Amino acid sequence: MNKTKNDISTHIDSLPDEFRQSVRQLDKVISEMMAGYSRVLWEGTLWGGTSQEIIGYGDYTINLSRGKKSEWFMVGLAVQKNYISIYVNAFEDQWYVAEKYRSQLGKVKIGKSSISFKQLDDLNMETLKKVLSIARDSMPKQPSA
């Protein structure tokens, strides 16, 4: 996956009707929670071989095996075929925060770092904000301009 310069508003406007408004609302919440950090559209093939478009918030560098490094996002927002996914690449007490707060996030499916749901009403927004604040607070501090 690679960062692009494609317009995020145009991307959201192109989403299926059933998800567009929810993604718009989530983008607003995540953007507010991650204020001061990057907001970029990532596009490309994800690990499972599927083509993806993910709004990424907060760039950071991850260390891969053999000393390699890669740039990624702390929080991601994407529409899959039948649901919305939020990716949170943060830990608390050695747990991915999505897993740690799974019982409080609502009627959602949880992966290691992903929160997936069909409707915004299925997601507990207050717990999501808590998870996002943990992600934001774990970000490396941005240099002053």
Image (cartoon, rainbow, N blue to C red):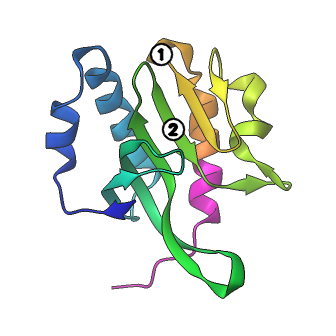
57 shown above or below 130: below
> Are the residues tagged 1 and 2 within 8 Å (C-beta)?
no
Mark 1, secondary structure of its residue: loop
Of mark 1 and mark 2, the one earlier in the sequence is 2
Amino acid bearing label 2: Ile
Give the residues in magenta.
133-145
User: Type of residue at label 1?
Assistant: Lys
Q: Which residue is at the far right?
A: 93
The local crowd at label 2, few if under 14, some if 14 to 19, many if 20 or more residues have their Cα within 10 Å, is: many
Does dot 2 land on a helix, a strand or a loop?
A: strand
Q: Residue 106: x percent and y percent?
A: 65, 18
Reading the image, the residue beneath label 2 is 86
Say whether residue 56 is magenta: no
Q: Residue at x 56, y 38 (%)?
A: 129
In this rendering, does residue 109 appear at all?
yes
Residue that appears at 68% across and 36% down: 111
Q: Residue 118's mark?
A: 1
Percent x, y of residue 72: 49, 65
The correct choice, above or below, for 3 with respect to 10 in the image is below
Mark 1 closeness class: few <14, some 14–19, many ≥20 residues within 10 Å: some
